[in-house]
Image (cartoon, coloured by chain):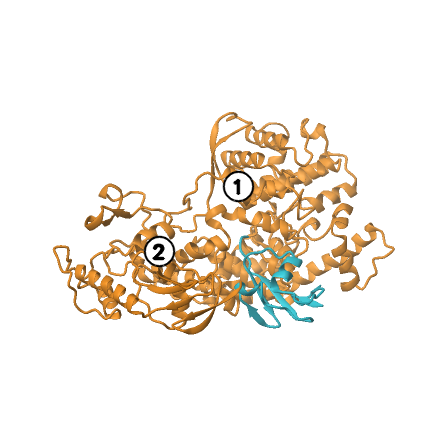
Amino acid sequence: MITINNRDQLEWTPGMTVRDLLTAMNFTYVLIMITVNGELVDDDDYDTFKILDNASVRAIHIHHGG
Amino acid sequence: MAKIDIFVNDQPVSVKEGTLLLKVLEAQKISVPTLCHHKDLKPEGSCRLCSVEVEVDEQREMVTSCNYPVREPIRVWTETETVIKHRRMLAEMLLGRWPNVPAIKKIARQCGVTESRFTSDLTDPNPKACILCTHCVRACAEFAQEHIIDFAGRGIKRHVAMPFEKVDPHCIGCTSCAYVCPTGALRIVDDLNNPVNPTLIRNHGMKVNAEMATLDAHQCRMREVGTANIVSVMNAYDLLPVMNYRFGTHEEVYKIDGGILKEKYFTQNMPDGCWKGCSMACAKTIDNFELRTGPYKGQLVTVDGPEYETAGGGSNMGLFDMDAIAEFNFYCDTYGIDTISGATCIAFVMEAYEAGIIDKTVTGGLDLHFGQSGSVLELLHQMSRGEGFGVDVGHGIRWLKKHWGETLNLTDEQKAFLQDIGMEVKGLEVSEYMCKESLAQQLGYGMAVKGPQHDEAWLIFMDMVNNEIPTYEDKAQALYYFPLWRTWFGLYGLCKLCWNDVTPADNKMTAEPQKVPDHVNNYFKFVEGMTGRKLNEEIMLNESARVHNLQRLMCLMLGKGRRNEDYMPYRGIGPVTKVEYESRQERYDKQLKEVLGIDPAGKTTEQKMALIREYREEQYDKTLDVVYKRRGWDPNGVPTVERLKELGIDMPELVAIVEEYKRSL
């Protein structure tokens, strides 16, 4: 199980990438920053960065608009 | 993005697919001469100095590295005999024509050239001569999107010019051309308003220009569709106000989002900034729009918009019809009606109509079900003409709640319902964000001095989605910093959009990315450049807090500005109706179970709604207490004398207002 933003839970699947997580959470926001267990993931690595089970993910939407 | 293994000068290097070769070489600390390349401009490959040899499928060729994306395993050589000979020839020709220009001399040295064989009548001894590098022409096109300057003449007569060799009045004076000029051929000869340090202002302004040119297309697309880019974002995150804020999403949103506007409506695909020189240029228009109603029926007009709030107002009225929203936009502008207040007020009227609180005897025969665009537009025309039901609606939600309570034979329950669903605070209609799942946003709306305008605090994502401010204290700090920062823009008359509607590529690496620190600094440098006064966060916050507290005292003078004025209608806090609860049952049941420790099983929707309401209203109250304390206000939301002293605004007449309030308690 993965914890997102210290609150939401997502079932982990083997080989899960950051992109898979964004899709599963419907995080379509453009200005988003992802850390996995405290490590900042480069935008270019979303397709390849593997998330391990029990990871703590921060998905920070940098607010714009408003 | 996939990695590709390549060889550079026989050394293995792993690069991300699509990376431009020059960037790869720079990262490898390999010196490559460039002239037309500029870090803030799109690569062009016209000077050909950056050429290298590349081998693909055993075929070698010369390529310009600045605009060569790596898409397959290649071998690269940067210092072959062919490459060196090619660069030397180019450097010698450049040096022959412009022997005294420092930028050219530097390139020549880099290529091992000190003398040129190509001295001729074309040789220009001016050390600040134009070297036809293309920077200025591209900056005009990419930074300001103006295309005011370009090349004229051919061959040896090629030169940079404005149309017909005259000063073009359309030049916006942004100075981008001078900023990127490597020789000084373009100079800035006038600094409007006599700033103390115009260079400081330009350098920071150009950073934003460059970000707009290189990042906007991948970020907020402000140039492309303006603020309407967030219609689909709000919908995806359940935050778009739908049918008087009952819901946050709708399946027909594609009919009113930025995509449809770009595809079928926006016509002026050109810069349309609010002010001369703005490179964000987010204002959009629809040309030749044929009106279907009203005094200009049948005429072709230009619609200034719509922006996000107007499209969001459309969904709030159940209008998933861009023609109707565009016409609503046009007539609101024509009549001097705020599209937000107009839409929110009509959405309230529509819900009251659908709930049976008012009927056609009240509306003058208008069918005001959600989505009735003809009735919406007729209401606008009535407001303008001062006729019929439009007169009542024109008074706004607060007035309507009172008026209907006094003139219609309503039950107490119906009166309470109107209070719950009438989305106004301090008499101003709420702007177009569905905030019931974000406590911080609710407080941002409720506590805003001028009423529930989102420009004082917009914390939905930080709170609801990111869970970045989970405690009361976290929320209070956010509701201290952001309203003061956003108020500060107003104090200086500066646009907020250049703060966070484009963000630096490295913003994620900063300690507080939500604040966009580099852009906050841009504003501070702008003030310093204009006035000579240096700012920092503390000075900025205190400047803003003085005005914020003064406004609060002015409200107090007028008999307002107290705690009872800072509450959101319950529609902004939680589900008022069964249909709302049931549309988000999973969320609310989870809150009951996990936060309140109450098993929702076996309880009716009404029972669960009552429990959720009690909890959420209590949370609102508790947060209000903590925010007041953080702001230096008493539990009634009134600035303390101590706070006025801290801010240096403890003038006798202001202290007297607080003292009089204390005596009245």
Q: Position of residue A28 (x, y in %)?
A: 60, 55
* Mark 2 / mark 1, whichever is N-terminal: 2
Q: Position of residue B555 (x, y in %)?
A: 56, 52
Q: Is residue B172 left or right of residue B586?
A: left
Element under disc 1: helix
The 10 Å Cα crowd at callout 2, few under 14, some 14 to 19, many 20 or more, is: some
**Residue B452 shows in this picture:** no
Residue with the most extreme right position: B602
Q: Amino acid at mark 2?
A: Glu
| Front of the two marks 2 and 1 | 2
Element under disc 2: loop
Residue with the most extreme front position: B58
Residue with the most extreme left position: B121
Picture quadrant of residue B482? bottom right
- Provide the residue designation for mark 1: B261
Q: Nearer the viewer, residue B150 or B634?
A: B150
- Provide the residue designation for mark 2: B44
Chain in cyan? A
Q: Chain of mark 1?
A: B
Residue at left 65%, top 59%?
Answer: B464
Picture quadrant of residue B354? top right
Q: Nearer the viewer, residue B87 or B240?
A: B87
Q: Position of residue B559 (x, y in %)?
A: 60, 51
The 10 Å Cα crowd at callout 1, few under 14, some 14 to 19, many 20 or more, is: many
Picture quadrant of residue B177? bottom left
Q: Position of residue B194 (x, y in %)?
A: 29, 56
Q: Amino acid at mark 1?
A: Leu
Q: Is residue A33 left or right of residue A5?
A: left
Chain in orange? B
**Residue B553: numbered disc:** none
